[in-house]
Structure formats: C-alpha cells, structure tokens
Amino acid sequence: MRIFIDIGHPAHVHYFRNFIKMMEGKGHKFCISARDKEITHSLLDYYQIQYTSKGRGQKSLFGKFFYLFKANYVIFKLARRFRPDICLSFGSPYLAQISKIICKPHIAFDDTEHAKFEHLLYVPFSNCILTPNSFKKDFGNKHIRFFGSMDIAYLHPKYYESNIKYLEELKLVDKIYFFLRFVEWDATHDYGQTGFSIEGKTKIIKLLSKYGQVIISSEGNLPNEFRKYLYRGDPFKIHTLIQYSSLFIGESGSMATEAAVLGTTAIMVNSSAKYFGVFEYISKFGNLHYYDQENEAIEKIEDLLSSNDFKKSSIRNAREYMRQNINLTDFMVWFIENYPVSYEILKKNPDYQYNFKQ
C-alpha cells in the first residue's frame, strides 16, 4: 500500500510516527509532506522519517489563504509523482482537497471541535473522519469514534519509554520541579482565545518557586524576568520531563493532555477548552483541570500544593485511563490496512475496537 501523510504540527509527528514505522516494517510505502512549524522538521529528522517541506505557514488570515494554494500545489506535485492508494492526516485541508482531485480516499483524524475554518476546508473532501468518542461535533455518516485520545498513539505503555537518565543530566532526579507551557495563540482556531496574563504568570512562578524548581517552555518571547526559567534542553526528551514533574501548568491543550496521560496533574487556562470533549473526558479521571479564568486555576494550584500525595494519585489515574481506552496505534494500523472494510465493520459494530484494548 502507498500512503500519503500530511503533517502540519509537531504533535502530528507523534500521532503518526509509530504507525509509520510499523507499516514500513510490513512493506508499505510512504510519502510525507510537512509544514515548517516550530520543531516539526526536527522531530521528523530525529525519528528518521523522510519528508518534503511544504514551507512555513502564515499568521494573518490573508497569508493563510495564500498558503493554502501554495501547500496544495506542493502536495499535488508530490501526489502525482507518488501515486498514493490512500491519504491520511490530522484534519489537513491541503491533502483532503488534493485527494479529491486525484480520486483517492482521504482519512482524517481530529479532536478540535472549534476549528470551524479547518472543518470547512477539509471535511467535505474527506471519506472518513476518526475522532475520540468524546468529540462533541457530529460529521455524519463519515464519522467514526474511538475510545481514548490522540495522545495514546505515542504515550501508550507499549510504545512509550521514559528516559530517567535525562533527568540525571538535568540534575532533577528526586527533585520537586514544575513544568510550565505558554503558547503564542497564532493558530486559526486560536483567534480571540486567551490564557494566562503576565500578572498571572508572575504570581504562579513566585508561588511555585517556594516549593521547587520552575521550568518554562514558551512559543513566543517571554519578559526578561522569566527567561532564566526557560527550558533549554533536548526538545525530543520533553515527555520525560513532563512525566516526572510535580505539576504541569500552562495554556497548551496538547501538552496538558500529555501530562495527564503520563501521570502528572495538569492545570490549564485556555478560554477555548470548554469546546473540547477530550478535555472533559480526560478530566473525569482526575488528572486534568481546565479553566477560563486564571484566578480559579491559581486557587487549584494552591490547593494541590497543600497536599502531599497528589502525584501518587495522578499516576494511579493515568493507569486507569490507559486501562479503559484502546491502543490507538494498533487500531490505526488495522483500520488503514483494511480500509474500507474496516470502516464498514466499525459502522456495524463500534465495539469491535475493544479488540485493541490492552
């Protein structure tokens, strides 16, 4: 089978990297296009996944519209040369539209309910859309729901291994530290959304510094007073850092759910979080707390810091979460290898996916 994948964000590399390696081991061929966003290309290089760049995206709405045509042109040229049997992405408008032109099925994953603009651009051109069961929107007959979240594709115990030696390098073994993540708010679906204020960040850092070390990851520029806390380590080992941190605090939905799944309690302020079914679902296991207002988040942080055993509880919660959901990578391999028969099977019997519960 010849499979075309379009990558638009660093998280998408993680979603598909285990799938790609497993399918390559079975003899399947891949063509991968990737946007030059943050560390996307570096991640693909790190995992030794060959790709073709489709350039950097744009921040303005006009720029994003122009980039749509540019990316479509790059993908069309690649697809015409590669001749895929099937196209796969995490809600890529570019690959979805080109798949329709070349008359090949496009399978999309999605977990972002409020990405209305992206939905307009890719849903009509997709043959099947797979989302977590908690996804609040309904895409009709082409919609397949699975039990779990996208994080499980790379954080499932079958595939994820922590690197305790990295903590030794950072001199963090047996130390209390807190991981903070701030975003730039420049994605199309981020327009009008907010997170922590500068005042809120300052208050949190001062509070956490009384209990342990503060480590910050940030997409945008930070005020000079915060720069001493910046994470300057290996970006490819950041999941180990998140896993062993006492708390995760930030604005990034992706990292907040990663922390929760890895056994670290996550506190998130993101005004769009209420639109996401996956946040609501993961929060039921006790490891994710999300808020519109930073004052409520700070109160929750203070409450957690007054407890001695919240880290042990969060580890137990993560184990229960994994126990109740499917191994997404194994499910993905089965679904793509057997499409469209797999689609028909799940439409008739959604519980068939429990065969991938481990």
Image (spheres, rainbow, N blue to C red):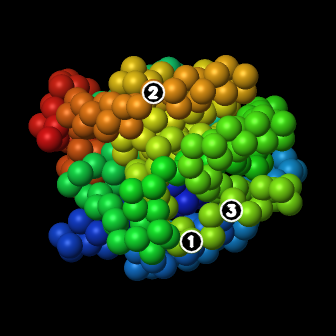
The reply, left or right, for residue 211 in relation to residue 45 is right
What's the distance in space between the residues labelled 2 and 3, CA to CA?
27 Å
Residue 348 is situated, as x and y percent measured from the top left of the image, at 20, 24
Secondary structure found at label 3: loop
- In percent of the image, x 16 and y 37: which residue is there? 357
From the image, which quarter does the N terminus lie in?
bottom left
Q: From this view, report whether residue 99 is shown above or below residue 34.
A: above
Q: Amino acid at mark 1?
A: Gly
Residue 17 is situated, as x and y percent measured from the top left of the image, at 37, 63
What's the distance in space between the residues labelled 1 and 3, CA to CA?
9 Å
Secondary structure found at label 2: loop
Q: Amino acid at mark 2?
A: Ser
Any mark on residue 230, and which? 3
Q: Amino acid at mark 3?
A: Leu
Which of 123/233 is in front?
Answer: 233
How many numbered discs, if any? Answer: 3
Quick check: can you spot residue 47? yes
Any mark on residue 307, and which? 2
Q: Name which of mark 2 and mark 1 comes first in the sequence.
A: 1
Which of 108/213 is in front?
Answer: 213
Q: From this view, report whether residue 153 is shown above or below residue 41.
A: above
- Disc 3: CA contacts within 10 A as few (<14), some (14-19) or many (>=20): some
Give the residue number, with chain letter if any, for mark 1: 233
Quick check: can you spot residue 1? no
Q: Quadrant of residue 355?
A: top left
- Disc 2: CA contacts within 10 A as few (<14), some (14-19) or many (>=20): few
